[in-house]
Amino acid sequence: MSVDAISSMTDFMKKSAMTMSGSILFLLNLIFNFLFTTIQFKLRNFALAAVDVLAVWATLVWALVAIWPVAPWVAYLNLPYLAWVTFASVLQITIVLINRGSSQRI
C-alpha cells in the first residue's frame, strides 16, 4: 500500500469515528427530548424536567461540536434548534424557580 492510500484510509477512519460519535450524541439528544414530555406532563416533576432539558441542550451542543469538523453544514442547520432548546431551558428553569415553594401540583 502506498503512503497516500494509508493516509486516506486513516483520514476516512477518523471522519467515520467522528460521524459515529456525532450520530450517537444526536440519538442521545433525541432520547432526552422524548423523555422531557413524559417527565413534564405525566410525572409533573418540574425540577427533573429542568435537568432533562439541560441534558437535551448539553447533548446538542456536544453533538454539534463533534460533527463540526466532518460536516459543518449539519451544525449550521441545527442552530435554530439550539436557539429553541436554549429558550425552552430558560423557560423550564424559570418555571422551577417560580414554583419552588409551591407544593400544589398543576
Image: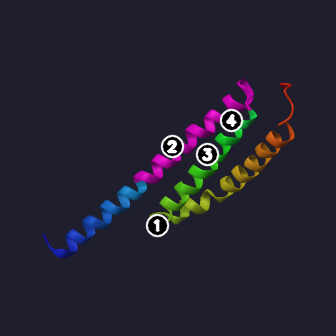
Q: Position of residue 106 (x, y in %)?
A: 85, 26
Answer above or below: position of 22 versus 101: below
Q: Which residue is mark 3?
A: 55
Image check: 8 left or right of 70?
A: left
Magenta stretch: residue 72 in it? no
Q: Amino acid at mark 1?
A: Pro
Look at the image and tell me in which quarter the N terminus lies: bottom left
At numbered mark 3, what does the secondary structure look like: helix, strand or loop? helix
Disc 4 vs disc 3: which is toward the camera? 4
Q: Amino acid at mark 2?
A: Leu
Residue found 70% across the figure and 37% down from its top: 49
Q: Position of residue 59 (x, y in %)?
A: 56, 50
Q: Amino acid at mark 3?
A: Ala
Magenta segment = 20-45
Q: Which residue is mark 4?
A: 48
- For marks 2 and 4, the one nearer the N-term is 2
Q: Which residue is mark 2?
A: 27
